[in-house]
Amino acid sequence: MLSNLDLIREFVQNSIQKKDVLLANPSLTAQTLYKSNQLLAKTEGVIATAQFTNTPSEFSINAKSSHWELMNEALADYSYILTGEIDSRNCYVYKYCQIPKDYRMHCTKSVLLWRAWWKYRKNVLRAGIPLDLLIRTRDSWYPIKDLIISDGLLYIKTLGSEIAIHSDDLVIWLSKIEVKPQN
């Protein structure tokens, strides 16, 4: 039997390829209906929709779903990013975004970016532009030069500007994939 995450990944993969889907486990059902794929939670109703009419596919995810974080993780694995605010249907819209080679995308609360920053902070002290963490702003990826928390806000300094966001806000960022040396 598929786990929730595995079922969600199958739903996303089939939807990207515009294939019909019919999957179920005790808590989730994925099905094709009227030129779209839908993901339903037994206790919540429709939690995600992928329209076949858009190329590449776009996903609408119910912002209040208890499965939102799993959906977010699965979509990030396929280079789909949150495009903005919650729409009139109380859904987040995700669209495909090209990710630079050797990076992994994250769409998390900003406090998780701050935690990752502490791991990579030592690399900023080296000469040159730090490329370990990148943030999405103004439809482009920018290296993070510094990150400071003050009065519940996270201040992110990039090469071009400074961004202030609340610690609970969602932020789209990339981390460099660590390449392990081969023996």
Image (cartoon, rainbow, N blue to C red):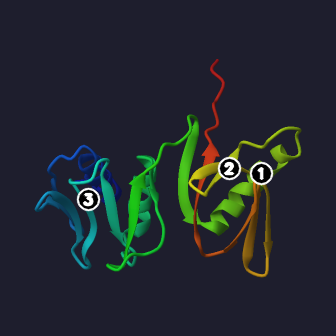
Q: Is residue 54 left or right of residue 148?
A: left
Other residues around mark 3 within 10 Å, as few (<14) / some (14–19) / many (≥20): many
Q: CA distance from mark 2 to mark 1?
A: 7 Å
Picture residue at 72% right of the left edge, 42% below the top: 131
The image quadrant where one finds the N terminus is bottom left
Q: Which dot marks residue 142?
A: 2
Mark 3 — residue? 50
Picture residue at 39% right of the left edge, 65% below the top: 93
Q: Is residue 110 left or right of residue 69?
A: right
Disc 3 + disc 2, Cβ < 8 Å: no
Q: Is residue 153 above or below residue 157?
A: below
Disc 1 + disc 3, Cβ < 8 Å: no
Q: Residue flagged by tag 1: what amino acid is it?
A: Leu
Q: Is residue 24 visible?
A: no
Residue with the most extreme top position: 183
Residue with the most extreme left position: 34
Q: Is residue 18 left or right of residue 154?
A: left
The image quadrant where one finds the C terminus is top right
Q: Nearer the viewer, mark 3 or mark 2?
A: 2
Q: Is residue 88 visible?
A: yes
Other residues around mark 1 within 10 Å, as few (<14) / some (14–19) / many (≥20): few
Q: Is residue 94 left or right of residue 143?
A: left
Other residues around mark 2 within 10 Å, as few (<14) / some (14–19) / many (≥20): many
